[in-house]
Image (cartoon, rainbow, N blue to C red):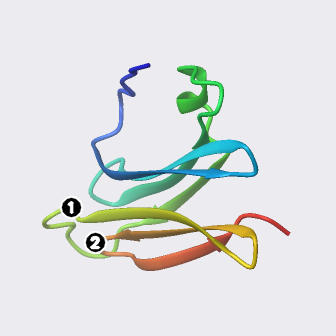
Amino acid sequence: FVTKISGDQTYTDCKAFKHNNRIYLAYATYANAKTGYYRICDITEKTEDSFYNPIFEVQVEIKGAPGNDTMDADLFTINGKLHASFLMTGTGVEVYCLEK
């Protein structure tokens, strides 16, 4: 399936990852020069609705000019628990444990 999400400025380097029979997609996006978002969607069911309703979303403040708009998102497991790391120009690297 193919979908387009409108309204956000830039997307890059999405990461899809299968964990516990679910498929997750992580990505970072700039909303404007001062605000960005880290998002994760559960795309197991392959519906467009899954993109519009992320299961994880963190708003981040962009410090300094974004310049080259570099972003990265990755999903991985540590000790069997799902983790996500995000990087965005002007924010640094952030790592989240997504399971208790």
Residue occupying image coordinates x 57% and y 76%: 95
User: Which residue is painted at 14% across and 67% down in the image?
Assistant: 67
Residue 1: name its quadrant. top left
Q: Disc 2, disc 1: CB below 8 Å?
A: yes
Judging depth in this view, the residue of 39 and 43 nearest the camera is: 43
Q: Earlier in the sequence, mark 2 or mark 1?
A: 1
Give the x, y percent position of residue 10. Answer: 27, 45
Q: In the displayed structure, would residue 27 be above or below residue 95?
A: above
Residue 15 in percent (x, y) is at 44, 53
Q: Secondary structure at mark 2?
A: loop
Instruction: Inspect the image, locate mark 1, and give the three-letter code of the amino acid beneath it.
Output: Asp
Q: Which residue is the site of mark 2? A: 89
Q: How many marks do you count on the picture?
A: 2
Of the pair 71 and 66, the residue shown nearer to us? 71
* Image spot of residue 91 (x, y percent): 38, 75
Q: Is residue 49 left or right of residue 30?
A: right
In screen coordinates, is 71 left or right of 18?
left
Q: Which residue is drawn at the image coordinates 20% and 70% (left, top)?
A: 65
Quadrant position of residue 89:
bottom left
Residue highlighted by disc 1: 69
Would you place residue 39 above or below residue 97 in this image? above
In the structure shown, which secondary structural element does the residue marked by tag 1 occupy? loop
Image quarter where the C terminus lies is bottom right
Which amino acid lies under the numbered mark 2 shown in the image of this protein?
Answer: Thr
1 sits to left or right of 53: left
Q: Residues within 10 Å of mark 1 (few under 14, many from 20)?
A: some
Q: Residue at x 40, y 56 (%)?
A: 36
Mark 2 surroundings within 10 Å by alpha-carbon count, few (fewer than 14), some (14 through 19), many (20 or more): some
From the top left corner, tell me how far across and down residue 14 is, in percent: 39, 50
Taking the image as shown, residue 37 lies to the left or right of residue 44, namely: left
Disc 2 from disc 1: Cα separation: 6 Å
Dividing the picture into quadrants, the one containing residue 72 is bottom left
